[in-house]
Image (cartoon, rainbow, N blue to C red):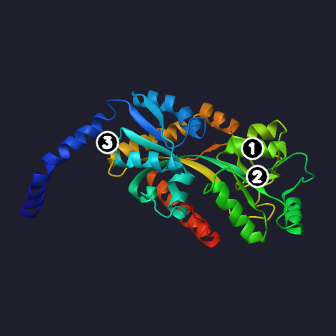
Amino acid sequence: MHILRRRVLSLLPALPAALPALAQTRSWPSRPIRCIVPSATGGYDVYARLMAPRLSELLGQPVVIDNRPGANGNIGMQEVQRSAADGYTLLFGHIGAITINTTIYRNMPLDPVEDLAPVAVAVTSPLVWVVNPGLPFRTMPELVAKVRAEPGEWRYALPSSGSINHLVVEDFKRRHRLDLPAVPYRGTPQAQTDVIAGQVPVMLDSLGAGYGHIAGGRVRALAVTARERSPRLPDVPTMLELGLDAREYVAWYAFMAPKGTPPEVIGRFNLLVNQVLEEPALVARLRELGASPRGGTPAEALAFLRSEQRDYGAIAREGKIEVE
């Protein structure tokens, strides 16, 4: 009895400090929530904008999408890192910013996986190998055979140095001993334009960004990098079933919060994200964009991000890929 009393009394000095945080958690949210997307408008922020209205309804407060591009996502992520850990500033970031940057930048200002708090991996989207439709290639093995037979004569369009597209193609080249030089661009639209025009023959695109060109016949899809075929491209095989890859490669997009955000806040937002990701209307819209809902717990998100950081770090080191 005396031991229990001593334990209770020992907690009393800490209770006044904890009460404001507890009260704040119970009243969250009492004002709009800002969700920073560390990229330009018109890109993967479409996923955040699809979810925001429903999340606003469930939370009873607006979820406002705020695009903060720059430094391949680092500027927006640093703003979230510096924000108060009160649940009113969140991040909706992509694989490149959250996990790949730490493996390719020599002087990273932060490690998002460890310096931010994962909430949920919300959406995934496979990559797709595409070629100009005027070329004779109908399958990925045909393209590989041609590149191998004519080393250095074929090139691929690279939307952005240090992107998932970059690492996956360079790893593929290394494993299959292919001489396929990159033609770098400052964004996906410019790279797509040159593949469509026949200036560059091949590209590894994201399905979300490239599906319209595939459906319109402006490019030909040869293979997707996901574990299973995409419902949007049911006739296009996966790299795994072709025996050309040993694992899947997908772009993904995750909610994060400043480190120290109350677990109760993160837990509630996580539950609502998972709820929205199960709603048929959103699932159907994601499918139209060539994407899939993922969801899961914060702990699962952290484990996944760490594994992705480890795997892409190994690719970057083996390929000596580095960005200033």
How crowded pointer 1 is (Cα within 10 Å; few <14, some 14-19, many 20+) is rated as many
Where residue 63 sits in the image (x, y, percent)?
A: 44, 32
Element type where label 1 sits in the image: helix
Q: Is residue 38 above or below residue 178?
A: above
Where residue 225 sits in the image (x, y, percent)?
A: 72, 55
Q: CA distance from mark 1 to mark 2?
A: 8 Å
Element type where label 3 sits in the image: loop
Return the residue at label 1: 192
Q: Is residue 58 above or below residue 257?
A: above
Q: Name the residue furthest right.
A: 136
Q: Which mark is residue 86?
A: 3
Q: Which of 38 and 64 lies nearest the eye of the viewer?
A: 38
Q: Is residue 49 above or below residue 73?
A: above
Q: Which mark is residue 103?
A: none
Image quarter (top left, top right, bottom left or bottom right) of the N terminus: bottom left
Q: CA distance from mark 2 to mark 3?
A: 42 Å
Q: Which of 78 and 31 lies nearest the eye of the viewer?
A: 78
Q: CA distance from mark 1 to mark 3?
A: 41 Å
The residue under label 3 is which amino acid type?
Asp
Whether tag 2 and tag 3 are in contact, CB under 8 A, the answer is no
Image quarter (top left, top right, bottom left or bottom right) of the C terminus: bottom right
Q: Quadrant of residue 269?
A: top left
Element type where label 2 sits in the image: strand
Total marks placed:
3
Whether tag 1 and tag 3 are in contact, CB under 8 A, the answer is no
How crowded pointer 2 is (Cα within 10 Å; few <14, some 14-19, many 20+) is rated as many
Q: Which mark is residue 203?
A: 2
The residue under label 2 is which amino acid type?
Met
